C-alpha cells in the first residue's frame, strides 16, 4: 500500500489542495505520491522538466494565484529535495 504524502513529490503542492486528490496510475487508480497536475495515467505530465524549471514554474503559478513573491520563492525552494528530483 502506497503511503499518502502531504505534498506532491514533484511540485510540492499540498495534496489536500488537489481537486482530484492525487494523480492517476496506468490502471486508473489514485497515485498518492504525485498530484493530478504532475502525474496522469502513470506518467509525468511534464516528463522532461528539470527541478530548477519546476521551481520557476511553481513560483510563477503561486504569484498568479496572488501569493507574494518572497512566499512563492520560499515554497519553491524545497522542490529539489522532493522524491522525484532525488
Image (tube, rainbow, N blue to C red):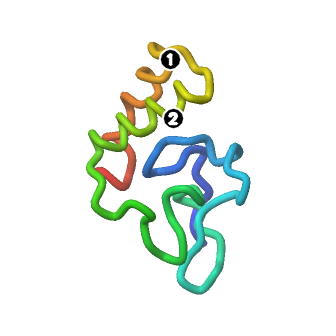
On screen, residue 66 versus residue 63, left or right, reads right
Q: Are marks 1 and 2 in contact (CB under 8 Å)?
A: no
Which residue is farthest front? 64
From the top left corner, tell me how far across and down residue 7 is, in percent. 56, 44
Identify the residue under disc 1: 71
Q: Earlier in the sequence, mark 1 or mark 2?
A: 2
Vertical placement of residue 78 versus 3, above or below: above
Q: Nearer the viewer, residue 5 or 68?
A: 68
Q: Nearer the viewer, residue 56 or 81?
A: 56
Where residue 61 is drawn, which disc sits there?
Answer: 2
Query: At x 29% / y 45%, what residue is drawn?
Result: 51
Query: At x 44% / y 72%, what residue is drawn?
Result: 43
Distance CA(mark 1)–CA(mark 2): 12 Å
* Secondary structure type for disc 1: helix
Where residue 45 is drawn, which disc sits there?
Answer: none
From the top left corner, tell me how far across and down residue 68 is, in percent. 54, 14
From the top left corner, tell me how far across and down residue 80 is, in percent. 31, 40
On screen, residue 64 versus residue 86, left or right, reads right
From the top left corner, tell me how far across and down residue 38 is, in percent. 49, 58
Query: At x 62% / y 57%, what residue is drawn?
Result: 4
Disc 2 crowd, CA 10 A, few/some/many (<14, 14-19, 20+): few
Name which quarter of the figure residue 74 lies in: top left
* Secondary structure type for disc 2: helix
Q: Nearer the viewer, residue 37 or 78?
A: 37
Name which quarter of the figure residue 56 lies in: top left
Disc 1 crowd, CA 10 A, few/some/many (<14, 14-19, 20+): few
Q: Where's the N terminus, which quadrant?
A: bottom right
Amino acid at each position: 500500500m502506497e503511503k499518502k504524502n502531504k505534498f506532491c513529490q514533484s511540485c510540492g503542492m499540498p495534496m489536500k489542495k488537489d481537486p482530484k486528490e492525487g494523480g492517476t496510475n496506468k490502471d486508473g487508480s489514485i497515485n498518492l505520491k504525485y498530484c493530478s497536475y504532475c502525474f496522469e495515467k502513470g506518467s509525468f505530465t511534464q516528463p522532461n522538466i528539470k527541478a530548477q524549471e519546476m521551481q520557476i514554474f511553481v513560483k510563477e503559478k503561486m504569484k498568479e494565484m496572488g501569493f507574494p513573491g518572497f512566499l512563492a520563492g520560499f515554497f519553491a525552494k524545497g522542490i529539489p529535495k522532493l522524491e522525484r528530483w532525488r
